[in-house]
Amino acid sequence: QLQLVESGGGLVQPGGSLRLSCAASGLNLNDYTIGWHRQAPGKEREGISCVPSSSGGSTNYADSVKGRFTISRDNAKNTVYLQMNNLKPEDTGVYYCAAGRIVTAQPPCSMVAFLYDYWGQGTQVTVSS
């Protein structure tokens, strides 16, 4: 059964860090572009980062997280991570990972949600003092 499972969310103070994990079963994440998306209360879902498949390309970050978040893969564990540092209250939301067979004309990878085929159930991140 094909499944993406996010973990690592929680409550953290401003300035703190969290590492989210996206573990897959039923598909080899290395064959897919993996994106992290988030949905804040009352707002639309937004793409915040992606890492390309083994076919090549480069990572991508939304301006709102650039310099604070880092996406990475562990192919042996079939897992993708999102390291989040210097968290801010506006980072609060439900974080989803998604997988898609996405080909872009040139780097970097795309964070556009409708291009992704498979989604996890989400993990809540709350940044508050």
Image (cartoon, helix red, strand yellow):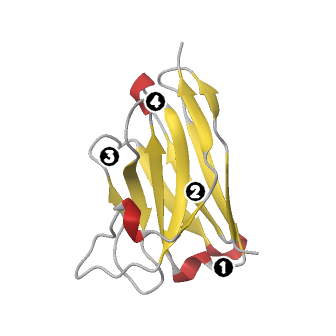
* Mark 2–mark 1 distance (CA, rounded to whole Å): 16 Å
Q: Is residue 87 left or right of residue 74?
A: left
In the rendered image, residue 84, in percent from the top left (x then y), is placed at: 50, 41
Q: Amino acid at mark 1?
A: Leu
Which corner quadrant of the image does residue 75 belong to? Answer: bottom right
> In the rendered structure, which disc, 4 or 1, sits on the residue that comes first in sequence?
1
Q: Amino acid at mark 2?
A: Tyr
Which secondary structure, mark 1? loop
At a point 26% along the width and 45% down the height, the residue shown is: 63
In the rendered image, residue 72, in percent from the top left (x then y), is placed at: 52, 62
Which disc, if any, is residue 41?
A: 4
At a point 62% along the width and 57% down the height, the residue shown is: 120
Q: Residue furthest bottom?
A: 55
At a point 54% along the width and 57% down the height, the residue shown is: 97
Q: Residues within 10 Å of mark 2 (few under 14, many from 20)?
A: many
> In the rendered structure, which disc, 3 or 4, sits on the residue that comes first in sequence?
4
Q: Amino acid at mark 4?
A: Pro
* Mark 4–mark 1 distance (CA, rounded to whole Å): 31 Å
Which secondary structure, mark 3? loop
* Mark 3–mark 1 distance (CA, rounded to whole Å): 28 Å
The image quadrant where one finds the N terminus is bottom right
| Vertical placement of residue 94 versus 29, above or below | above
Mark 3 or 4, closer to the camera: 4
From the image, tell me which residue sits under label 2.
81
* Mark 4–mark 2 distance (CA, rounded to whole Å): 23 Å
